[in-house]
Image (cartoon, rainbow, N blue to C red):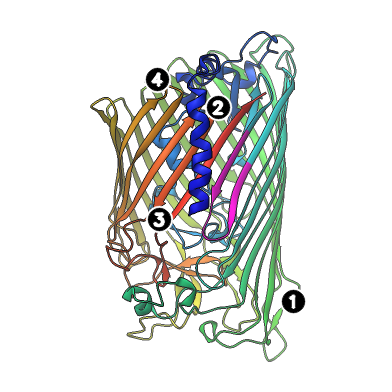
Amino acid sequence: MLKKIVILLFVILPCVVSGQVRGKRQQADNRQGTAAQTPASKNTIDTPAAPVPTDTVATIDMYKIITLQRDTILVDTTLTIKRDYATNYLRKDNFGLLQFPNEGQTYNTLFYGLTTYDPFPGFGFKAKHFAYQEVDDINYYNVATPFTEIMYRSVLQQGQILDALFTVNTSPNLNLFIGYKGLRSIGKYINSISSNGNFRVGASYNTTDKRYLLKLHFTGQDFSNQENGGITTITDFEGGEDPYTERERLDVYFRDATSVMKGNRYFVDHYFRLNKTNPNSLLFHHQFNYENKFFNFRQKTLSDRFGDASKSSIDKKTRYNRMYNLVGAAYANETIGTIEFYLEDYTYNYFYYSVILNPDGSIKVPNAINDRIDTYGARYTYQKDKWKGTALVSNSITSQSLTNIDLQLRYKFDERNTVSARFQKMNKLPDLNYQLYQSDYVFYNWSNNFKNEKINSLQLDVKTQWADLSAQYTVLNDHLYFYNSNNTPGLAQFDSLLVKPKQYTGTINYFSVKAGKDIKFLTYFGLDNTVLYQQVQQSDKILNVPQLVTRNTFYYTDRWFQDALQIQSGFTLNYFTKYYANDYNPLLSEFYVQDRRKIGGFPMIDFFVNLKIQEFRLFLKAEHFNSGFTGYDYYSAPNYPYRDFTVRFGIVWDFFS
């Protein structure tokens, strides 16, 4: 604690001096501007950053972040409450996600509306994918001068999080970027070390006449977590008595189990326009994505929770690779928009190096699933004035019966008022770990042939100067889930963990409404509120969510030392109502449905002080400081406690060379 205070003093001291340096402050103000919070109105690839003369200060609108869909956001150097919410390991607002005890572990999902779907079969092991950067999570850049961003944050006990990005335009047409996010955190409980890494490198290029556009990247990602299975005796935790307030004294289920997932991806997306001069022309589009992953669970000491084992120790690796190609031809017209017809080719191989045999020698559980899926589709895009819309329809050519309809429409009244709607109808192939899984634990071996999941979803988003509102209605049929097959009555501590996949034959209706508003008053004060209401109609307890989730932040903001230092300070309350939260199975790296113990109903209050000096931002937070006096009944899953009170700090520092 003393070390953190000393570091804080060394940070604050220079701000007093910098208050006397008016020239540098003015230069920083030129960079940050109010536009830093607002998406740009045009595609960045169409407006490359020109070289900046040596006697000119580059403004913030010359530093652009570009998504794969070619939406543009300006680099954000501001200090806002929204920025505070996103300064975490995931680098995004994690409202609706409940963190596990240690940084770098998984999250329990409170807000089901965060769930996304892909019609193609996924790898599975979804608990390992919260921090995994998918194709749409990789951004591209266009900058006037070399740009560097560094984010550092302290963790639980020993370790740190560091996320560093460097990007440069070697010419107005070519941008290169490289980044790495690394984490190591010891944690407060036995056998809970996290050691994760996300490496990314890529480029974007366009010819001067915009006839050819290219985006490409490579990612190498690894996630290693010691798995303790949660605490064995919750009464020791909830009692709040010594010596169990020292969390390393609480007994856990596993002392030598570890799960690891690694993945590499090679991605290319490029367009070529047939006509050299006329923008109303044919376009040819190709996208390539090759990805390989593996998941490995290791355990030297066997556990009765998982049943009998065929070996004296556990070490089983699930391997997966896929290759995706899209080839399309589109007609682009400035008046009617762009219509594209395309073909997709998706091949995958999910496999082990062994088979499981029946007593008679026949194959009980095969060693692989592999297939080739071909689809055809059409996509229409329209963007003009205040309207933007897309319509996508795809269907399988091969025998897998895969379909996807995705309709989106947005109307932008002005910068502060937007209405958008989305409808999605999907016939989704099951994730592969539902279909096939092997383990050295005898119970955890299966081969299934589940039906496709059917998903219908309607979403409405309204963003106004008065409040933000979003509503979602989703209908699920043939929903796949994991459940604990041991139904021993009165089993309170989940000593048995015999989890299997299952398909629900009924219909699940899910409805949610989320509202948010940041209220400013008395010049220096604000109250930022986000409230979520959810309701599920189903015959059985399959999809379980808290009915109410809320986050409320009361804060003070001002500028000190002749505007050289910006300060924010306040309190954030997070709360969700009690419900049958899904429990976590580390052997599968999946959450499973349970109906024996509710969690929730406890407040989580943080106190924070955030400071900004030019492009340097400091985030100091006392997390869950109320834990010692509101009761030790806080959990992330039925036998995984939520985090205790801890003081953490982080920095975000932007460099504009």
Rendering coords of residue 170 (x, y %): 76, 22
Answer yes or no: is residue 134 visible. Answer: no
Q: Is residue 424 above or below residue 215?
A: below
- Secondary structure of the residue carrying tag 3 is strand
Along the line of sight, which residue is nearer the eye, 279 or 71? Answer: 71
- Secondary structure of the residue carrying tag 4 is loop
Mark sitting on residue 415? 4
Span colored in magenta: 149-163
Q: At 39% across and 26% down in the image, what residue appears?
A: 560
Residue picked out by circle 3: 476
Give how far apart the Cα atoms at labels 3 and 2 are: 38 Å
Rendering coords of residue 479 (x, y %): 44, 61
Which numbered mark, 3 or 2, is in the foreground of this view? 2
Give how far apart the Cα atoms at labels 1 and 2 are: 50 Å
Quarter of the C terminus within the rendering: top right
Overall secondary structure of the magenta stretch?
strand
Residue picked out by circle 1: 354
- Secondary structure of the residue carrying tag 1 is loop
Mark sitting on residue 595? none
Between disc 1 and disc 2, whose residue precedes? 2
Which numbered mark, 3 or 4, is in the foreground of this view? 4
Between disc 3 and disc 4, whose residue precedes? 4
Give how far apart the Cα atoms at labels 4 and 1 are: 58 Å
Between disc 4 and disc 1, whose residue precedes? 1
Which numbered mark, 3 or 1, is in the foreground of this view? 1
Residue picked out by circle 2: 75
In the rendered structure, which amino acid carries the disc numbered 2? Answer: Val
Between disc 3 and disc 1, whose residue precedes? 1
Q: Is residue 161 magenta?
A: yes
Rendering coords of residue 365 (x, y %): 66, 77
Q: At 56% across and 69% down in the image, what residue appears?
A: 588
Along the line of sight, which residue is nearer the eye, 116 or 317? Answer: 317
